[in-house]
Image (cartoon, rainbow, N blue to C red):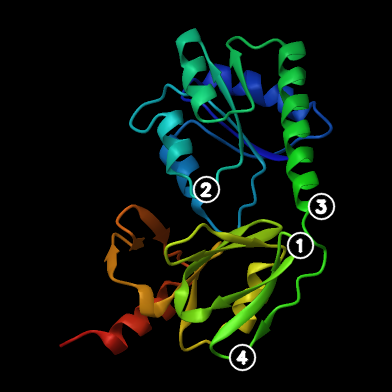
Amino acid sequence: MKCIAIDNDAKALAHLCTFIEKSPNLQLLAKFEDVQKAQAFLSNDKNEVDLIFVDPDMKDLDGVDLVKSLIEAPLVIFVSNKTDRAYDAIKLGAVDFLLKTVSYDDFKLAVSKAEKAAENRRNEMMQLPRSSKFENNGRFIFIKSEYKVMRINLDEIQFVESMREYVRFHVNDGRPIMSLLTIKAVENYLPKDKFMRVHRSYIVNLDKINVIERARIVFDGDTFIPISEQYKDRFQAFLDKNFAQ
């Protein structure tokens, strides 16, 4: 599992990284004392992180707020010297909560839980139909979802969200429709004049965009789609073309 470690306390961070590096099933991608730099790393489309070890109590942006800010959060293990932060861990669905200074036995047990959680995610994906034929005639598409073939009208799609091995189609006035497809396959099939990829994990319906703020597209007032560095020039060209002078 690819992981990162985040802690303002250099000694505690070094202690944790020693355990990570001696664990054969873990690959330490990066370590951070600065939570803002960790957030930037996690927001980069190129960085695939499976597991975060993070102290919930840090300066500026704490570990809890960091996890809440992530669009697609990896698995999380909180490491703290305050027992009362365990409640935050439970609320956020963290894999485990470790008290400093962590023993290697407790660390291994937490990692084992993370591996089990990752396995459960994979098993959920295996239960989806393995063939997802995607047909598009310019007005609607047919996809396989929950062992059914479903029709989705293109003008009802707000955005498409990648969830690693599958995607969710977020539609008007309805729950997301899940299908075992890659976001790249969806991007190739949807009409380029109506849909645009703006992030590694998101494709948006250009006709549905009403509000843009701080490099984010806002849907329904409380759903924020980030516009990543990789796609911002193309999106800016779309804005320039349609901006009233």
What kind of residue is marked 2?
Phe
Q: How far, Cα to Cα, is label 2 from label 1?
A: 37 Å
Choose top left, top right, bottom left or bottom right for residue 60.
Answer: top left
Q: Earlier in the sequence, mark 3 or mark 2?
A: 2
Label 2 sits on residue: 41
Instruction: Give the residue number, with chain letter if any, for mark 3.
Output: 126
Q: Residue at x 54, y 23 (%)?
A: 90
Q: Is residue 82 visible?
A: no
Q: Are marks 2 and 1 in contact (CB under 8 Å)?
A: no
Secondary element under disc 3, as helix, strand or loop, is: helix
Point out the image quarter for the C terminus.
Answer: bottom left
Determine the CA span between mark 1 and mark 3: 12 Å
Question: Residues at badges 1 and 3 in contact (C-beta under 8 Å)?
Answer: no
Label 1 close to label 4 by CB (< 8 Å)? no
Q: Which residue is mark 4?
A: 137
Location of residue 17 by image quarter: top right
Q: Amino acid at mark 1?
A: Tyr
Question: In the rendered image, which residue does mark 1 sit on?
Answer: 147
Residue kind at label 4, given as amino acid type: Asn
Give the spatial CA distance, label 3 vs label 2: 30 Å
Quarter residue 103 falls in: top right
Image location of residue 195, percent across then percent down? 48, 80
Mark 1 → mark 4, Cα distance in angstroms:
22 Å
Separation (CA) of disc 4 from disc 3: 29 Å
In the shown orientation, is residue 10 left or right of residue 211?
right
Label 2 residue SS:
helix
Q: CA distance from mark 2 to mark 4?
A: 39 Å
